[in-house]
Image (cartoon, rainbow, N blue to C red):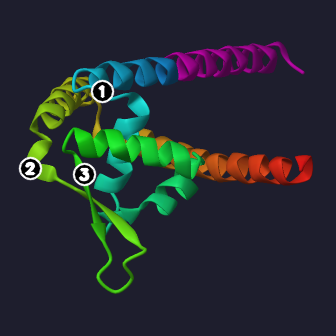
């Protein structure tokens, strides 16, 4: 290997190390930021992430089972989360008119102002950072985030499935 290739390899290795370090730091900061924002309205980060999952669901109405499947949290944990969200007025539980045993969870968007204003301020702060990037750079960032999001979604599913398999084998 030539000296130039060794230098390129060392440089790339250092950049990948820095990328990993920064990704872990940003991930931790994001969790802590969401926790701090959630606490301003008497919730926790998991509560607000569940709210986000409902908010971005195409139908805007979900079941507790869907949240449990998607998050990997037990149905008992989801019930406690929904109890907190309902008590704070962020959601309502609605019985299915066709099957009274089935309960849907629906957002009460009219009560979101305290939380939305905080997230809008957060979004404005982040937009100040990205407005300095060119269209080409933004396309690169978008591609990276789309791939990382898809990879993370698959890793969540795999981890939940593996945990379920381990629980079944432990019995």
Q: Which residue is mark 1?
A: 38
Q: Which residue is mark 3?
A: 91
- The residue at the point 28 percent across, 23 percent down is 37
Q: Which residue is mark 2?
A: 110
Quarter occupied by residue 119: top left
Circle 2: element type: helix
Q: Is residue 110 above or below residue 132?
A: below
| For the residues bearing labels 3 and 1, Cβ distance under 8 angstroms | no
Circle 3: element type: strand
Q: Mark 3: few, some, or many residues within 10 Å (few <14, many ≥20)?
A: many
Q: Quadrant of the N terminus?
A: top right
Quarter occupied by residue 126: top left
Q: 134 or 98, which is in the foreground?
A: 98
Is 76 positioned to the left or the right of 164 in the image? left
Earlier in the chain: of badge 2 and badge 1, it is 1
The magenta segment: 1-25
From mark 3 to mark 2, how far is it between C-alphas? 10 Å
Residue 142 inside the magenta-drawn segment: no
Q: Mark 1: few, some, or many residues within 10 Å (few <14, many ≥20)?
A: some
| For the residues bearing labels 2 and 1, Cβ distance under 8 angstroms | no
Residue 65 in percent (x, y) is at: 51, 61
Q: 19 or 56, which is in the foreground?
A: 56
From mark 2 to mark 1, how far is it between C-alphas? 17 Å
Q: Mark 2: few, some, or many residues within 10 Å (few <14, many ≥20)?
A: few
């Amino acid at each position: 290997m030539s000296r130039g290739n060794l230098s390129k390899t060392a440089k790339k290795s250092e950049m990948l190390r820095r990328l990993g370090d920064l990704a872990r730091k940003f991930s931790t900061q994001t969790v802590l930021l969401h926790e701090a924002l959630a606490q301003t309205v008497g919730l926790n980060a998991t509560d607000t992430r569940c709210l986000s999952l409902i908010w971005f669901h195409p139908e805007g109405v979900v079941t507790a089972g869907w949240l449990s499947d998607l998050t990997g949290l037990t149905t008992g944990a989801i019930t406690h989360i929904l109890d907190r969200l309902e008590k704070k007025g962020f959601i309502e539980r609605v019985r299915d008119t066709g099957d009274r045993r089935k309960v849907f969870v629906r957002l009460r968007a009219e009560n979101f102002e305290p939380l939305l204003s905080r997230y809008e301020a957060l979004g404005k702060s982040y937009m100040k950072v990205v407005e300095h990037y060119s269209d080409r750079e933004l396309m690169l960032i978008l591609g990276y985030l789309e791939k990382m999001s898809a990879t993370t979604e698959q890793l969540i599913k795999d981890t939940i499935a593996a945990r379920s398999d381990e629980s079944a084998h432990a019995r």
